[in-house]
Image: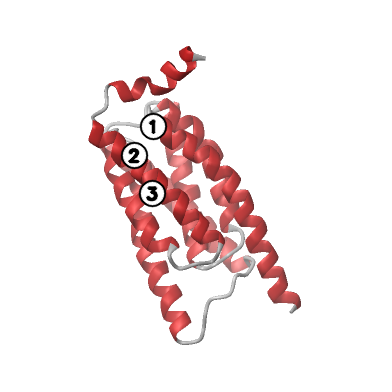
């Protein structure tokens, strides 16, 4: 048992206290933002922004450029989503939770492809893209970009992207030495499933009400 604990904690033996504290803070704020997302509460955005800014710094430090791009995008889209949710609500036009239509799927697919191509270009620019983890990072970048876009539009399917992306990210972050974040993504898989069920129920209630 102690051997497993040593393996899990070994990356932190070489990290500074500030680095570990930043990761722990980002984990706490990420979990909090997901709970607010499940409740369809606008606080998902300001809380999430803190987390994504921290992760932008951390992922750039370890050359996870795909995830660095993801977190920058999260930050920008969080400001956009924050504005959209508040603006629509203040004008009594709150965006309802709905399912994707054909146009939504098309936009999401185009965004996914564009994001993957752009991520590959970034990796090549920095002379990377030489390992399996780099390609996985490119894939998760496309998945998370698509999920964040659908979340801003309040589409039920956004949770499916989080599910898939989180499952892939668990071993990736363990491999990169972010043990706390790897554990976080394991729990995010479960929270994503819960979020999908909650939003699906609300969307169906709106259809049949």
- Callout 3: few (<14), some (14-19), or many (20+) C-alpha neighbours within 10 Å? many
Up the image or down, 31 lies above or below 184; here it is: below
Instruction: Write down the residue under mark 3.
Output: 70
Secondary structure of the residue carrying tag 1 is loop
Mark 3 or mark 1, which is nearer the start of the sequence? 3
Mark 2 or mark 1, which is nearer the start of the sequence? 2
Up the image or down, 18 lies above or below 86; here it is: above
Task: Say whether marks 1 and 3 touch (CB < 8 Å).
Answer: no
Q: Nearer the viewer, mark 1 or mark 2?
A: 2
Q: CA distance from mark 1 to mark 3?
A: 16 Å
Residue 146 in view (yes/no): no
| Quadrant hosting residue 20 | top left
Residue placed most toward the observer, 103 or 68 = 68
Instruction: Write down the residue under mark 2.
Output: 23
Residue placed most toward the observer, 165 or 203 = 203
Instruction: Residue 170: give x, y in percent of width and height.
Output: 50, 34
Secondary structure of the residue carrying tag 2 is helix
Residue 147 in view (yes/no): yes
Q: Give the farthest residue toward the right.
A: 208
Task: Say whether marks 3 and 2 touch (CB < 8 Å).
Answer: no
Instruction: Residue 8: give x, y in percent of width and height.
Output: 43, 22
Q: Give the farthest residue toward the front.
A: 2
Instruction: Residue 72: give x, y in percent of width and height.
Output: 32, 52
Q: CA distance from mark 3 to mark 2?
A: 16 Å
Image quadrant in which the C terminus is located = bottom right
Q: Nearer the viewer, mark 3 or mark 2?
A: 2
Q: Is residue 175 left or right of residue 62?
A: right
Q: Which residue is pictured at 43% across the width and 40% down the height? A: 138
Mark 2 or mark 3, which is nearer the start of the sequence? 2
Instruction: Write down the residue under mark 1.
Output: 178
Q: Nearer the viewer, mark 1 or mark 3?
A: 1
Residue placed most toward the observer, 122 or 197 = 197
């Amino acid at each position: 048992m102690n051997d497993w604990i040593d393996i899990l904690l070994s990356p932190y033996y070489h990290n500074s206290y500030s680095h570990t504290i930043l990761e722990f803070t980002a984990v706490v704020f990420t979990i909090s933002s997901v709970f607010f997302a499940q409740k369809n509460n606008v606080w998902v955005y300001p809380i999430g922004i803190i987390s994504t800014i921290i992760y932008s710094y951390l992922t750039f430090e370890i050359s996870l450029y795909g995830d660095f791009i993801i977190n920058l995008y999260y930050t920008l889209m969080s400001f956009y989503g924050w504005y959209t949710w508040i603006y629509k609500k203040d004008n009594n036009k709150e965006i309802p939770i709905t399912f994707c239509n054909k146009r939504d799927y098309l936009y999401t697919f185009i965004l996914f492809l564009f994001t993957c191509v752009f991520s590959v270009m970034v990796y090549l620019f920095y002379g990377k893209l030489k390992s399996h983890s780099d390609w996985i990072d490119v894939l998760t970048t496309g998945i998370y970009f698509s999920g964040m876009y659908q979340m801003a539009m309040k589409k039920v399917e956004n949770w499916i992207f989080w599910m898939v992306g989180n499952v892939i990210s668990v071993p990736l972050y363990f491999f990169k030495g972010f043990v706390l974040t790897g554990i976080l993504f394991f729990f995010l898989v479960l929270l994503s499933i819960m979020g999908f069920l909650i939003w699906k129920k609300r969307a169906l209630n709106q259809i049949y009400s």
